[in-house]
Image (tube, rainbow, N blue to C red):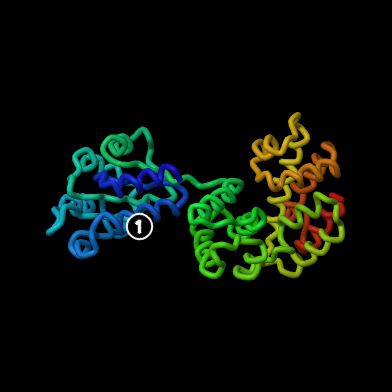
Amino acid sequence: MDEVKQIVANIRDGNISPVYFLMGDEPYYIDKISEFIENNVLAEEERGFNQMVMYGKEVSVDDIVSNAKRYPMMAEKQVVVVKEAQHLSRTIDALSSYVEKPLDSTVLVLCYKYNKLDKRKRLYKSIQKHGVLFESKKLYENQVSEWIRKVLHGKGRRIDPKACMLLVEFLGTDLSKINNELEKLQLVIPKETGITAEAIEENIGISKDYNNFELKKAIGERNITKATRIITYFAQNPKDNPLVVTVTLLHNFFTQLLNYHGLSDHSPRNVASVLGVSPYFVGEYKIAAKNYPMKKVSQIISHLRELDLKGKGVGATNISHGDLLKELLVKII
């Protein structure tokens, strides 16, 4: 986020590069930077003749260079945006000659999603020297909650840790989807009111009681009644609660619990740092560690691997995912 803020700040200050190459596996920031350039480099009345959007599927590198070499009409600059530029991956190196001698009056933006340039190639080195090269990296799941918190903090908003975790479970690491839901929540929830799990359930439709995080917590506490109730709900709603997501989350939890057992320093700050979790959830690991010794945790991880294979049809046929989860619960507790 700091690199994105710096790029935006430079553009606002009039320090505009002739070439912006935006690449990487996370499309959210690529779109955000591209949109900012489209909306802020030229005045609205200048865009009709001096702003062009091209698509990598429909053009060649020669077409891009030809348009980039045009001079603006009644304006100081023109903006050429190439979306889906990753479709030009086989010929993109041919852009090197232009990048080494770009037209100062052109702002060329290339959106190279889900891919990145080879650092050894001439184009990569040329953009580093003459333009802005930005790699938008995918966030790990344990980083997304903090990203949500920072985005909302920047808008003067608060969100509960549990509400964060619900969003991550339901929407995964897709920042664009998460941002869309956050925008909706901000429309209906007063600014002075924090975003809670109840607000998520009411406005997005995610259950605050029947989800993988509540299942993880119930298993950690050895609360058989609650865990059984959640698993039964999952069995009745398999499309909304796929087995693979549940198994992955439980596997991550017990792997982290194994790491917890191996720590000599169990202070909340150290545990949160080593396990990559919010300090808010450290208490759950402390309780689970008392309920599951290290040897038992290792056995549970083995059971989860077996369940993952059975869920994919290996060694088990015609067994519902609900029954597999009930079998797992018996083995765990």
* Residue 320 screen position, x and y as percent: 77, 64
Label 1 environment density (alpha carbons within 10 Å; few <14, some 14–19, many ≥20): few
* Residue 48 screen position, x and y as percent: 20, 65
Residue under numbered circle 1: 35
Q: Nearer the viewer, residue 113 or 280?
A: 280
Whether residue 319 is visible to the viewer of this picture, yes or no, is no
**Residue lying at 72% horizontally and 41% vertically, measured from the top left:** 255
Local secondary structure at mark 1? helix
What amino acid does circle 1 point to? Glu
**Residue lying at 80% horizontally and 49% vertically, measured from the top left:** 220
Q: Quadrant of residue 295?
A: top right
Whether residue 77 is visible to the viewer of this picture, yes or no, is yes
* Residue 192 screen position, x and y as percent: 56, 62
**Residue lying at 66% horizontally and 44% vertically, measured from the top left:** 277
The answer to whether 250 appears left or right of 11 in the picture is right
The answer to whether 35 appears left or right of 152 in the picture is left
